[in-house]
Image (tube, rainbow, N blue to C red):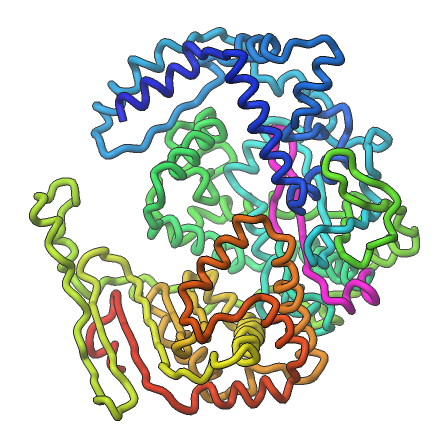
Amino acid sequence: LEEGLKRFASFFTSPLFTQSATSRELNAIESEHSKNLQSDIFRLYQIEKGRANQDHPFSKFFTGNKATLLDDTKKKGIDLREELIKFYSAYYSANQMSFAIVGPQSLITLKKMVEAPFSAIPNKNVGAPENKWLDIPPFKEGKTLIPANKNIVEILPVQELRQVTLSWPIVFESKEDSVSMDLVKPDFYATHLLGHEGPGSLLSYLKSQGWANALGAGTNTELSNFETFEISIELTSKGLVENLDDVVAGVFCYINMLREGKIPNYIFDEVLKLSELEWRFLQRGSAGGYAQSLVKAVVDYGGVSPSLVVAGPRKLALRETPTRLISSGEARTEFASAVQRDEAKHLSLILLSKLTVDDAFVTVISKDFEGKTDKVEKWYGTQYRARPIPTTTLEKWSAAPPASSLGIALPRPNVFIPSEKGLRLKSKVFQEVTDARARSFEDRMKPIRPPSLIRDDGEAGRWTVYHKQDDRFGEPKAFVIFQLLTNEVYASADKAALAQLYQTSATDILNEYAYDAGLAGLSYDIQVLPRGIRLTFGGYNDKLDDFASYISQKLSRDINDVLPENDAEFDRYKDNLMRALTAFNVKQPYAHAVYYSALTLQPRSFQYTNAQLRDAVRRLTLPDLREYAASLWSSGKGEALIQGNLDKKEALA
């Protein structure tokens, strides 16, 4: 590590910037750009930039390529290497840099490793580059390349996408606005409400009309003086072709309900509890990812208070009052006071007040626009068309009907949030386990105790069950895997396609019930595999039993409850699967390599190509799916593994 830090520091203290290295990097940038040309993510992002003020740097081509970095500079008589050195000399200053290191060494040792090589970076006391454009509005009517608000942009994608996105620029009026967004995080509450998928949610309403398959909400682009808030909806064919205006009207119906200011306290309390629960039992991730998050937090939170660098990005309500920060990073179960909650409510309503019809950027993406576009984006060749939204449509969206008339409502209280009692540990063995670094090599090499067999019905019996109570990690979580072994469920391409349709249908129909559970740290997964069916459950053990029992009951006994009710619903799932399989053709080469390498791990008699699965999906019907689902659980040998904060008695129950 020490040698690596010395080499890393030399990048900033004595870079070579040789002509050959500059040329190699230029070729690497061009190669990267070429790879991204068929990526819808990059193509859509550049369209978004076209709707910004072209005097603002956000509007620029954001990766660069050989044409911009070499050809254009040559035409202007600019030496690329000299410009690179000028930029380095102007901005690579210690006062504009942050540093984070994660390692197993002590803080004293890490500090010594860092000080010597990095203290050589000169402090030129230069201002931040963004200071030059802070006074330039990021969005300004008449200064865009592509029409922005009150216009709809229709885009032809590479993949089989069918989506409408509503985006709003949230421009910070001052540095205080930006700090409040970081400390209070009102966007978390707005995202929780608009992106909710339970009963009465916006998505539930759109699905019930047959207009949408999925929905996502949250902040997207984040710069120093603005961010964007987006709602993206994956549409059905009916939702796109016949009811697009109604879909958008549904969005504003929900927003209007929220803007009325009658959001109950329990919703803010739950969002805080869920955030604190995640913080309290945060899983250790990779050192590299953690270092990256820390160095960004130094920029975002270090100027407010160094104490917030670790907890700041991961916790809500970081101010006890508008003028006083929280004094501890300890996990909380509630707001410190009504004043703290009221600030979260107030700032959330301010954010929601900005999600208006007049300020929305509407973007629609579909293969249906083939041959209907009239413009081509410069850098990625994206075909698109921009057209004004009729005044009558804008008025319709503004006057969206009351939420109650559409069956739309605020989320119900989340019954899956674990209680403090339910978070108690059932084993104390873990307390005797010292830090791994303090244990001897021999201790660390001792094999972990395997699970115990607690039920064996024999060869002719139904179940074999293994159990292992947590004695190592000390978390109030459990994981359960059930597997029904049978070789019939994947015996042909038709059955493999039916397996995917069954998984899609069951997951979608159970989503309204399972969504709150997912927010509260519970999860489940159903897989139909060559060896049989596998059900996996995990999360906080307090409510895991109730959750797993309900899901298992629906999947194995109330079979018709997780199947499409009619041909229209079946066709929606079939369309989803078909588009996913078709999208395979335009994926990048590495994705094909991953797919085929995974296929080789399947038993040879169960290897079905993407083309075989597409052919199978085309000929399948709803009666086929019903017959297949009825046979899934009829026979087979059951195996189970129950592991975590559950004792043997609970495991056998």
Residue 614 appears in the rendering: yes
The magenta segment is 217-244
Nearer-the-camera pick, 363 or 142: 363
Q: Is residue 350 visible?
A: no
Which residue corresponds to the image point at 67% horizontal and 80% vertical from the top-left? 619
Kindly indicate the quadrant of the structure image that contains residue 79.
Answer: top right
Residue 249 located left or right of residue 192: right
Q: Is residue 381 above or below residue 252?
A: above
Q: Position of residue 69 (x, y in %)?
A: 66, 20
**In the rendered view, does 343 fall on the left or right side of 173?**
left
What x and y, as percent, mark residue 637? 32, 85
Where is residue 151? Give x, y as percent: 85, 45
Q: Quadrant of residue 473?
A: bottom left
Above or below, 298 relative to 518: above
Q: Residue at x 56, y 49 (%)?
A: 589
Residue located 54% across and 17% down the image = 22
| Nearer to the camera, 30 or 308 | 30
Q: Quadrant of the C terminus?
A: bottom left
- Residue 263 spot, x, y in % from top left: 61, 58
**Would residue 148 be counted in the magenta stretch?**
no
